[in-house]
Image (cartoon, grey):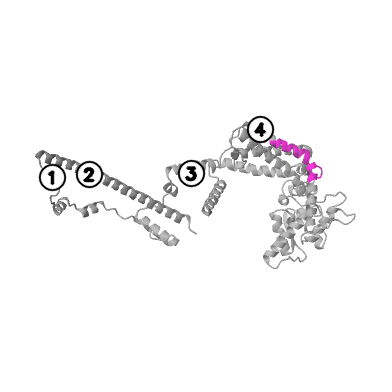
């Protein structure tokens, strides 16, 4: 691949050739202009001379006989000029050129550098300064400052008022309609939506519906569990065989085994450990903040080659998650909600073995397990995401309409982008207000009980607030410096535009 230095060397030499050609063209134009001037002056002198001769001849009474023979050779001798001398004095030297073929890159670069040595071209100068005109440099600098650098937000009081109001509305929705697992209206709707999705997925794969007197959800889950069997589905601490761990994983039972088994996590961590366990005939758990791996019965993945087995492992992981997302088949029925799968990355909280909470002096890791056992699972996470989504969308809509109605911007300039400093600050205030309302409600209602506090806390809101806060801190710290992400995005768009022009 041609490196950047070779490319800039070629551009600098081409720039030198261009300037030399322009200079030579200027010299030629100047010479032609001078010749035209001399020719015009000579014609004027000849005309004047002819007029003077005619006047003198007339004064003397001499009549010029046009039929008189004139010796042309004599005239030539009188008017003869030294053409060779004039040619040598006005001869233009030939411009230097690059001999290499651009299709043979290394040879071409060698010729480029030979040219640079012959013509004293400095290849170590800043290409930005050497290859652009002053107006181009000013334009680039202005664009970089306006579009590609981190800038501080310049919000007014209305921005903060709108953002705070949006966060307050989302916070009230979180308190009133989400609450704790199994009780909030949005939580119940989320459970129903997940149940419906599981049944539809089972029907796509061939489930014919429940048998007489059997709960539909239990039947659909049982169908998926048989369809996507895995080797890492142990449920008890002290049981032996495929359902237990022989005491290696502490305090595990059906209500929390989806949390303790890392392969049941609906994220990249879960996918990694699921495929690893399926290939190695193992199960991976978290116990007392430590990673525990146990051997399981032999498990054979479908597929004739490695890639096919990876795909089969992914399908098993995904299908098994859907069989567990609404609780196991044995736990469903009789209005039982069952224990679902954890939210993405929630399993990692089991490694946070810090603090002492409650009368049992539980660590934060044990508290997170107890919270999961109370129904703080993926389904509840869907309900928790709704107030966060409302806060996000309301804030973006308010910013867009303020730009249009208050600042009189065109609609094309009112598209909400998190790269806009003012919108980023408004999102920080909005999500911060949501977290403030959520934290105050959880603190007041929990009465100091850490499990109750976490049950009422919106972990999705706090995670979103953390990401927005991190971006704001980075922007404040790097204010005035180049935003590499924005610069790369701009360059990608320019590259696509250039390719589009070339295709046309």
Please indicate whether residue 501 sits to the left or right of residue 121 in the image: right
Q: Secondary structure at mark 1?
A: loop
Q: Position of residue 376 (x, y in %)?
A: 77, 47
Please indicate whether residue 174 sits to the left or right of residue 93 in the image: right
Q: CA distance from mark 1 to mark 3?
A: 75 Å
Q: Nearer the viewer, residue 134 or 343?
A: 134
Residue at image position (10%, 40%) is 61
C-beta proximity under 8 Å, tags 3 and 4 = no
Of badges 3 and 4, nearer the viewer stands 3
Q: In the rendered structure, which disc, 2 or 3, sits on the residue that comes first in sequence? A: 2
Pointer 3: what residue?
Answer: 140
Q: Secondary structure at mark 3?
A: helix
Q: CA distance from mark 4 to mark 2?
A: 85 Å
Q: Secondary structure at mark 2?
A: helix
Q: Is residue 172 rendered magenta in the image?
A: yes
Please indicate whether residue 472 sits to the left or right of residue 209 in the image: left
Please indicate whether residue 146 sits to the left or right of residue 288 in the image: left
Q: Is residue 414 rendered magenta in the image?
A: no
Of badges 2 and 3, nearer the viewer stands 2
Q: Nearer the viewer, residue 143 or 262?
A: 143
Of badges 1 and 2, nearer the viewer stands 1
Of badges 4 and 2, nearer the viewer stands 2
Q: CA distance from mark 2 to mark 3?
A: 53 Å
Q: Secondary structure at mark 4?
A: helix
Q: CA distance from mark 3 to mark 4?
A: 36 Å
Pointer 1: what residue?
Answer: 64
Pointer 2: what residue?
Answer: 43
């Amino acid at each position: 691949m041609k490196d950047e230095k070779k490319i800039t060397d070629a551009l600098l030499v081409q720039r030198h050739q261009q300037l030399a050609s322009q200079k030579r063209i200027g010299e030629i134009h100047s010479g032609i202009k001078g010749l035209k001037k001399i020719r015009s002056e000579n014609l004027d002198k000849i005309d004047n001379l002819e007029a003077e001769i005619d006047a003198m001849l007339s004064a003397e009474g001499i009549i010029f006989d046009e039929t008189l023979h004139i010796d042309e050779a004599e005239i030539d001798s009188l008017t003869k000029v030294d053409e060779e001398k004039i040619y040598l004095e006005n001869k233009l030297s030939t411009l230097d050129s690059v001999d290499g073929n651009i299709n043979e890159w290394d040879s071409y670069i060698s010729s480029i550098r030979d040219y640079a040595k012959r013509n004293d071209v400095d290849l170590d100068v800043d290409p930005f300064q050497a290859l652009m005109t002053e107006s181009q440099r000013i334009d680039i600098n202005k664009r970089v400052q306006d579009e590609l650098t981190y800038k501080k937000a310049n919000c007014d009081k209305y921005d903060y008022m709108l953002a705070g109001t949006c966060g307050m509305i989302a916070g009230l929705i979180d308190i009133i309609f989400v609450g704790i697992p199994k009780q909030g209206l949005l939580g119940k709707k989320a459970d129903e939506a997940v149940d419906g999705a599981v049944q539809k997925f089972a029907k796509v794969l061939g489930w014919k519906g429940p048998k007489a007197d059997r709960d539909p959800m239990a039947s659909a889950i049982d169908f998926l569990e048989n369809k996507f069997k895995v080797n890492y589905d142990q449920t008890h601490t002290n049981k032996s065989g495929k359902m237990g761990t022989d005491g290696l994983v502490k305090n595990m039972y059906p209500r929390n085994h989806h949390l303790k088994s890392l392969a049941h996590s609906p994220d990249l961590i879960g996918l990694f450990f699921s495929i690893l366990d399926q290939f190695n005939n193992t199960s991976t758990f978290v116990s007392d903040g430590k990673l525990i791996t146990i051997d399981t019965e032999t498990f054979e993945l479908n597929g004739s080659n490695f890639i096919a087995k990876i795909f089969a492992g992914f399908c098993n992981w995904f299908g098994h998650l859907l069989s567990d997302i609404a609780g196991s088949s044995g736990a469903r029925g009789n209005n039982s909600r069952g224990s679902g799968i954890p939210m993405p990355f929630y399993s990692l909280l089991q490694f946070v073995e810090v603090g002492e909470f409650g009368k049992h002096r539980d660590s934060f890791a044990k508290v997170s397990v107890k919270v999961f056992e109370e129904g703080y699972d993926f389904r509840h996470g869907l309900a928790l995401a709704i107030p966060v989504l409302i806060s996000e969308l309301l804030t973006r809509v308010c910013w867009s309409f303020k730009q249009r109605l208050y600042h009189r911007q065109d609609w094309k300039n009112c598209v909400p982008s998190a790269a806009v400093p003012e919108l980023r600050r408004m999102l920080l205030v909005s999500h911060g207000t949501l977290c403030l309302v959520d934290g105050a409600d959880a603190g007041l209602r929990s009465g100091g009980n850490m499990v109750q506090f976490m049950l009422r806390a919106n972990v999705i809101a706090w995670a979103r607030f953390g990401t927005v806060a991190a971006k704001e801190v980075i922007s404040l710290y790097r204010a005035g410096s180049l935003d590499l992400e924005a610069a790369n995005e701009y360059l990608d768009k320019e590259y696509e535009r250039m390719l589009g022009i070339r295709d046309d």
